[in-house]
Amino acid sequence: MRVELRDVTKSFGAVTALRRVSFTLESGERVALLGPNGSGKSTLTRSLLGMLDCRGEILLDGLSPVADRARVAPRIAYVPQIAPRLAAPVREIVAAVARLRGLTRSAIEEIAAALELDLSACAARPFRSLSGGMRQKLGIALALASRPSLLLLDEPTASLDPRARQRFFELMETLAEKPTVLLASHRLDEIRHLVTRVLVLEDGVLTYDGSSRDYLGDHAQGVIEVLVDDEEVARWLAVHGFHCTGSGWWMRTVKNGQRLDLVQDLTTHLRHAVRDLVVRDVESIRIAKHDAKKEPTP
Amino acid sequence: MSAKNQFVAIARIELAEVLRSRWLWFCVGTYAVLCSIFVLVGLRESSVLGFTGMGRVLMSFSHALVLLLPLLGLSASGQVVNRMRDDGSLELWFSHPVTRGAFFAAISFVRIAVLVVPLAIVLPLLGVIGQVSFGQSVPWGFVTRTLVVASALLVVSVAIGLLVSTFVRNQSKALMLLLFTWALGVALLDFALVGLMLQWHVQPLLVFTLAALNPVQDARLALLAGADPELGQLGPVGFFLAQELGPTGLLVAGIAWPCVLGATCWWVTLQRFRRGDLV
C-alpha cells in the first residue's frame, strides 16, 4: 500500500502535535518512525488509522483513511505497544476480530503458535490478566493473520522475550505479501531487522528522512568491552577513550558507525594482550533534539 | 465486510461487557423491587380502597419510574464513549475494519436493550405473579402504557447520556453533567421547580414551555393520564396540557417527544462521533 502524507497538521487545543508533515512510503517499503516522547509518533500512527481528524491530506493507495474507511481499514493492521486492559476473555476478542476481518480462528492460532502463545490454553482468561508479552503476542497474531497491505507497529517486541522476538523477526521475513511497514520504535534490533528507512519526528516536525543504515551509524551506539592482562596496554586504551571497570575489563561507548574501525585498531595494536572482547548494542537510540540532517519537505 | 456483520460483532462484545459489569442484573433487580412494591401494595390495596386508592398508587409508581428511569438511562450510557477512549478500547476496535456508524449504532442498541428488555420482562411477569398470588385483575392497559412510555423515556435518557459521553472527554466532568441533567429533568416537574416558578410569577408561557419540553414531565403526564388523575396530582402545567391535549394527546406527547428528542440527540452525537477524534 502506498502511503502519502501532504502537509498533515494536527492540533489538540493549543498543542500542535503534527506540523505540516509530508512524506511518501512506497508500496512494500519498511520505514521506522523515531522521535522522543511526545514528538507526534502516536498521533501520526492514529492519523493513518483514521482515528484523528487532521488538516492536510493522508492518502492510502489514493484513498482517505477517514472518508474511505470501509475500503481502507480491512487492509491495515496495527500492533500497539500497550494493549488495552480489557476485561473480555481472549476468546471473545479473537472471535470479534475474526468476525470483523473475516478470518478463521485457526489462522490466528497458527501465528500465535509460531510466537509460542497457546490460544486454546488462555481462551477463557480475561485479556487484561495476560502478561504484557502474551498480550503483545496476541496483538501480533491478530495483525499478521489479517494479511495487511499496511502494517503499523508500535514497539511490537517491547514486551517479548528474546526468543519470541527472534520468532517475530522471522515471521516478518516470511510474510507472503510484502506489506508497507511503519514501525514506531526506539529499539535498535527492531530497526536493524525490520526497516531500511528512518523518519524522525521532533515536536511534530519531520526532521530526518534517510536510510536506516546511515541513521544508525550516526545515532545508535555500541559498547566495546575488552579484557586485557597486560598493564602496558592500559595507556593505549586510556588514550583511545576506554576506562577501566575493574577485573581487567576496559570499556568504551562508541557510535555504531565507528565501532568496526575501533575493533580493527584494537586487534591490530593489542592482539597479544587481549584475552576477551565483547561488542554490544546500547539498546535505545539517542534522539537528540535539533540534530536534524534534513529539513522537512515543504 | 458488511455493516450488519460489524454491528453484530461490536454488539456482542458490548453485550458481553455489560453482562460482565452486572449492569443488566442491577437493572433487573431495580425493576423487580419497584414492580414488587407495585404488585404488593397496588393490587392488594386496590380491593380495599377502590379506584381512588389504585389511582394514588399508580401515581406514586409513575413518579417513581420517571425519577428512576432517566437516572438509569443516563448512568448506563453517560460514560461509555469517554471510558472506551480512556481505556484504549476505541483504539483497539478502530484498528480493525469497523465503521464509526456501525460501532456507534451497536453500542447504542445494546445500551437501550439492556434497559428496556428487563423492564419488558419484569413488569408483565410480576403482574402475572400478582394476579396469581392475590387473585386481582392486572390493569394491563396501564402496564402496556407504562412499558411504552418508559421505553421512550429510556431512549431519550440513553441518547442524552451518549451525547454527554461523546462530547465530554473527562469522565468526572461527564458524571457531573449527567447528574445535573437528571436533576434538571426532575426539577422541571410540576411538583418541583415549575411550581415554584409559577409562585414566583415567572412568565407562564415560559414556564409551561420549559415543562412541556422536559421529556420527564411528558412521560409523567402520559403515565398519569392513564390513571384518571386530578389537578392536585397533575399539577398546573399538567392540568393545562391535559385540558389542551386530552388523555390521548398526553400519551402521544409522552411517547413521541422523548423519541424525537432522543433521535435528535443520537443523530447529533453520531455526527460528532463520525467526524471527531476517536482517541
Image (spheres, rainbow, N blue to C red):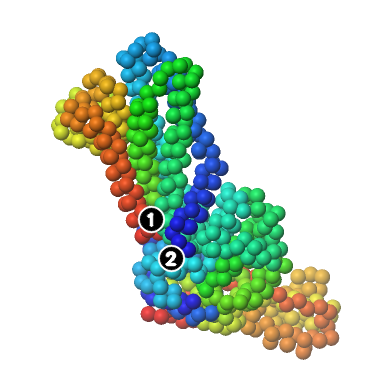
Q: Is residue B234 above or below residue A290?
A: above
Amino acid type, label 2: Ala
Amino acid type, label 1: Phe
Which quarter of the figure has residue B136? Answer: top left
At x 36%, y 60%, the residue is B275
Residue B28: percent from the left, percent from the top?
49, 33
Q: Chain of mark 2?
A: A
Q: Chain of mark 1?
A: B
At x 42%, y 48%, the residue is B108
Name the residue nearer the viewer: B109 or A69.
B109
Residue under circle 2?
Answer: A70
Q: Residue furthest bottom?
A: A268
Name the residue nearer the viewer: B208 or B127.
B127
Name the residue nearer the viewer: A82 or A147.
A147
State left or right for residue A256 relative to residue A16. right
At x 65%, y 49%, the residue is A124
State left or right for residue A87 relative to residue A250. left
Q: Is residue B229 above or below residue A211?
A: above
State left or right for residue B229 relative to residue A263. left
- Residue B175 visible (yes or no): no
Q: Secondary structure at mark 2?
A: helix
Residue B236: percent from the left, percent from the top?
21, 25
The numbered dot on residue B273 is 1
Residue B125: percent from the left, percent from the top?
47, 28
The numbered dot on residue B222 is none
Q: Are marks 2 and 1 in contact (CB under 8 Å)?
A: no
Q: Is residue A50 above or below residue B268?
A: below
